[in-house]
Image: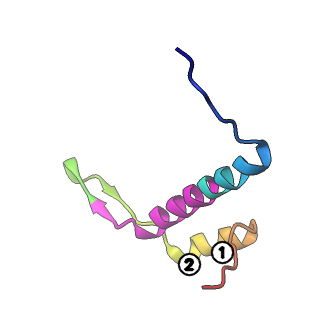
Amino acid sequence: MFIETKELDNNTISPLFLAVIEATEEAIINSLFAANTTVGFKNNKSEALPISEVLKVMKKHNALKNKER
């Protein structure tokens, strides 16, 4: 029994990898801004990140992308 397979060359697969990278970056950034301050067991508190401060750090390190939508 033989199985026929097809291969994708590097130029074909690269856009897929780039899309995965971009989606992962966006998911991480979304989670940073969506977090709320929570209080848990024994009154342990986890503060939400200050959005304005996060934006300053991201701008400083050129981590923001201008996207037209």
46 vs 59: above or below: above
Left or right: 9 in relation to 52 = right
Give the spatial CA distance, label 2 vs label 1: 6 Å
Picture residue at 63% right of the left edge, 54% below the top: 21
Nearer to us in this view, 15 or 37: 15
Type of colouring: rainbow
Left or right: 41 in relation to 60 = left
Picture residue at 56% right of the left edge, 23% below the top: 3
Residue type at mark 1: give it. Lys
Left or right: 15 in relation to 30 = right
Is there a contact, CB below 8 Å, between mark 2 and mark 1? yes
Circle 2 sits on which residue?
52
21 vs 50: above or below: above
- The overriding secondary structure of the stretch rendered in magenta is helix
Q: Quadrant of the C terminus?
A: bottom right
Picture residue at 49% right of the left edge, 72% below the top: 50
> Residue 49: within the magenta?
no
> Residue 31: within the magenta?
yes
Nearer to us in this view, 48 or 18: 18
